[in-house]
Image (cartoon, helix red, strand yellow):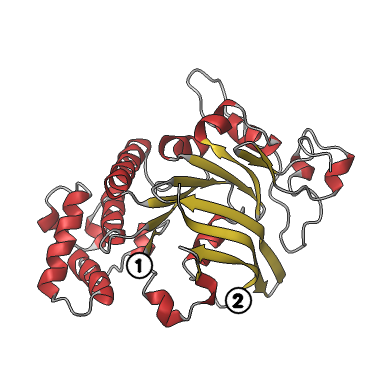
Amino acid sequence: MMTLLEVAGLSVIYHTDEGTVYALDKIDLAVGKGEIVSVVGESGSGKSTLANTVIKLLPPYAKVTEGRVLFEGKDILSLSEEDMRSIRGNRISMIFQEPNIALNPLFKIKEFMTDVYLAHHPEASREEALSRSLEMLREARVPTPEDVLERYPHELSGGMKQRVLIATSLLNSPDLLIADEPTSALDVSVQAQIISLLKRLQREKNMSVIFITHDLAVAAQIADRIVVMYAGHVLEEGSVDEVFQKPLHPYTEMLMKSVPKIGAEKIESPPGSIPDLRRRIEQCPFMDRCPKAFGKCREKPPLIALGDRKVACWLYNEG
């Protein structure tokens, strides 16, 4: 499979009033052409920071301290903002986590979508932009799309707003779609509809997708491969079947136990919380919560390959 996106040794820090936050630590990630990779982890694991780095939308107080983000072999991090605008929203598109923030409440859907299209196609007429918007709403299976175009965001349900954002993200036929928790604010039945929609559109357009979620059960429904993140580190990577049948890292095992199961009396939540990222982590990042921790864990384990899988754990690497 041809690699479309490669993240290599990526580290990101935030300069805050309370000190330096080490958000990402030497992250490696590859996404193949036409592949769906799900990045999974609790809040604070660095998933959204990774996504925002890929499209160069980090806040001013953030800094990439090392690493590269290669899109078709070209380092995105070295591009000027003008050059990046030809990629962002065009070759690489993103569905943001909260539709109520992404959609401007002062503009009708038609104004929002046509403005997005015209930003990348200034030579097009507004009529052409409106026609393309209508076409994409139909592809997103939006009922009565002509009516939706005339509505304001507050007049739409959460699921419908998410469909509008999906349609908008596909206006320019991107090669890579980043979906940042696109189902987290939706009820279970609407979640299933959105996941089914994304899978169908990905398959029809042969897009690559980075699907970010805190929910392993959701990741299993859509992804080809799962990358497990924790405290700014990648702890495990493998195909969906491999990770679910035999999770390697103790953290992945704990996430698996938190997935609701039919007939289970209770859901087991991982004890403890993510470490304070204002201190650089020099040990295994999961050590303080790990039931299998031992002396060697005071050193940070490397991410090693075990066949087609990867894991950062001293249980599999004696160093």
**For the point 19% across and 54% down, which residue is it?**
137
Going by the picture, which residue comes out furthest to the top?
Answer: 263
The answer to whether 252 is drawn above or below residue 161 in the figure is: above
The answer to whether 178 is drawn above or below residue 201 in the figure is: below
Which of marks 2 and 1 precedes in the sequence? 2
Q: Is residue 138 left or right of residue 65?
A: left
Q: Is residue 205 left or right of residue 128?
A: right
**Where on the picture, by quarter, is residue 23?**
bottom right
Disc 2 crowd rating (10 Å Cα; few below 14, some 14-19, many 20+) is few
Tell me where residue 296 appears, x and y as whole percent: 87, 42
- According to the picture, the residue beneath numbered tag 2 turns out to be 61
In the image shown, does 279 or 26 lie closer to the viewer?
26
Q: Amino acid at mark 1?
A: Gly
**For the point 18% across and 79% down, which residue is it?**
123
- According to the picture, the residue beneath numbered tag 1 turns out to be 89
Q: Nearer the viewer, mark 1 or mark 2?
A: 1
Helix, strand or loop at label 1? It is loop
Helix, strand or loop at label 2? It is loop
Tell me where residue 35 appears, x and y as whole percent: 42, 46
- Label of residue 62 in the image: none
**For the point 45% across and 38% down, which residue is it?**
218
Tell me where residue 32 appears, x and y as whole percent: 46, 50
Q: Amino acid at mark 2?
A: Tyr
- Distance from Cα at disc 1 to Cα at disc 2: 23 Å
Tell whether label 2 touches label 1 (CB within 8 Å). no
Tell me where residue 240 appears, x and y as whole percent: 51, 34
In the image shown, does 127 or 240 lie closer to the viewer?
240
Going by the picture, which residue comes out furthest to the right?
Answer: 295
In the image shown, does 87 or 178 lie closer to the viewer?
87
Residue 58 appears in view: no
**Where on the picture, by quarter, is residue 176?**
bottom left
Instruction: Indicate the quadrant containing the C terminus: top left, top right, bottom left or bottom right.
Output: top right
